Image: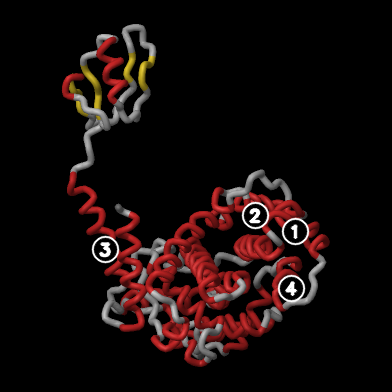
Amino acid sequence: MSDALERPLDEVQPGMALAAAVVDRNGQVLLPAGLTLAENHIESLRRRGIDKLSITPPEAPDAKARQREAARARVMHIFRHTADDPAAQPLLHAVLAFREEQLK
Amino acid sequence: MSQPSLADIVSHIHSLPAMPAVALELLQTLSGGDPDVDALASRIARDQAITARVLRVANSPFYGLQMRVGSIHDAIVVLGFSAVRSLVLTSAVVTTLPAGKCAGFSADRFWRHVLGTAVAAQALARPLRRKPESLFIAGLLHDIGRLVMLSANPEGFARVIQIATERDCHLVDVEAEIFGCDHTAVGAAIAQHWNFPAEIVEALAFHHNPAQTAPGSLAAIIHYADGIAKALDLEGAENTQMARLQLAAIDALGLDWQTLTAVLAETHGRFEAHLPLLG
């Protein structure tokens, strides 16, 4: 991934995800890309003398909010002539709730 | 230009490829009676394209089978005749009825919308205590009149689409202006011609106007299922707009909030699982 971050091992926290596989000097894969790091992974990398990792940046906190806003706008577009129609109300509110749930 | 009559449009049905005999026979088994399941299974199995699509769906995670099913016979044993019948009919209808061509018409979106309506109707079956299969079939066929109109007069149908786009209104509001009748009348006439069960004919005729039918009718269920498919954006058209719903028909279905949200989630899941039927 192009926007992966190089982080010194000391700054890496459990719960972060690897953007690229960790390989040793011989090209042997120690940990696969995409793995969510646990405390023991970090310890074992430290023992093997690895000092930098490529980490997937955490999703920006407002990315989710933007997705939710886009989903809501799309629903309102579909209901553009019927948002005030009493017959369409239950379905409108149920589908908005469903989209919220999907993007949790 | 004089408008073609309903009879003229419906006469075009003879220019359409025939529904496979086995599909028509399956539809007739919806009316009840005691179908010869073994004989039907053998006949379905002769159509390899249909068989392949049906098995792909039957083996999808949605059905959660312990073992892969490898034949129509096995699928009937494991899923039941009714469920397999719906899958076979969908596949038969999609593969044999012509997609039709005219400016502005997308066959892919058409089939996605009717499949979405079919699975929404199926998701409504449990809360409404109805058998899911006729709901599914009625949903699948509810707009079939459009395919015949399109085949009878592609330029006319292109005009319908163009005007509806300009006015940002529903196709059904424009159809009668150009054709003298709308897809509900054409669909019901075809369904009669094919000897579909009366309830399905009624659903095709009144899915835009269920006030003409009894509360809780199949037409009323398809009316709401059509709206659910649109609300969930299943056809993937930019200009999708919510159907005009009739309050009395929807109130009569008596769905509470919790049930409705569960129906939406189930419709979404079923739709993804059944997409392979469209090829």
Report the disc number at residue B29.
4
Q: Check disc 4: other Cα within 10 Å, few if <14, some if 14-19, many if 20+.
A: some
Q: Which residue is mark 2?
A: B54
Residue count near mark 2 (Cα–Cα under 10 Å), binned few <14, some 14–19, many ≥20:
many
Residue drawn 55% across the image and 87% down it:
B4
Residue under label 3, please give it.
A72
Q: Amino acid at mark 1?
A: Ile
Dot 3: chain letter: A
- Give the image's coloring scheme: secondary structure
Between the residue at mark 1 and the residue at mark 3, the CA separation in whole angstroms equals 44 Å
Asked if residue B155 is positioned above or below residue B5 in the image, the reply reads above
Horizontal arrangement in the rendering, residue A16 relative to residue B20 (left or right): left
Left or right for A90, reference B185: left
Residue holding disc 1? B44
In terms of sequence position, does the residue under pointer 2 or pointer 1 come before the other?
Answer: 1
Q: Are marks 2 and 4 on the same chain?
A: yes
Which secondary structure lies at badge 3?
helix
Residue shown at 35% from the left, 62% from the top: A98
For label 3, count other residues whose C-alpha is less than 10 Å away and answer few (under 14), some (14-19) or many (20+). Answer: some
Q: Are marks 2 and 3 in contact (CB under 8 Å)?
A: no
Against B175, residue B262 (above or below) is above
Q: Is circle 1 on the same chain as circle 3?
A: no
Residues at circles 2 and 1 in contact by the CB criterion of under 8 Å: yes
Marks 2/4: CA distance?
Answer: 19 Å
In this rendering, does residue B101 appear at all? no
Q: Which amino acid type is shown beneath numbered disc 3?
A: Arg
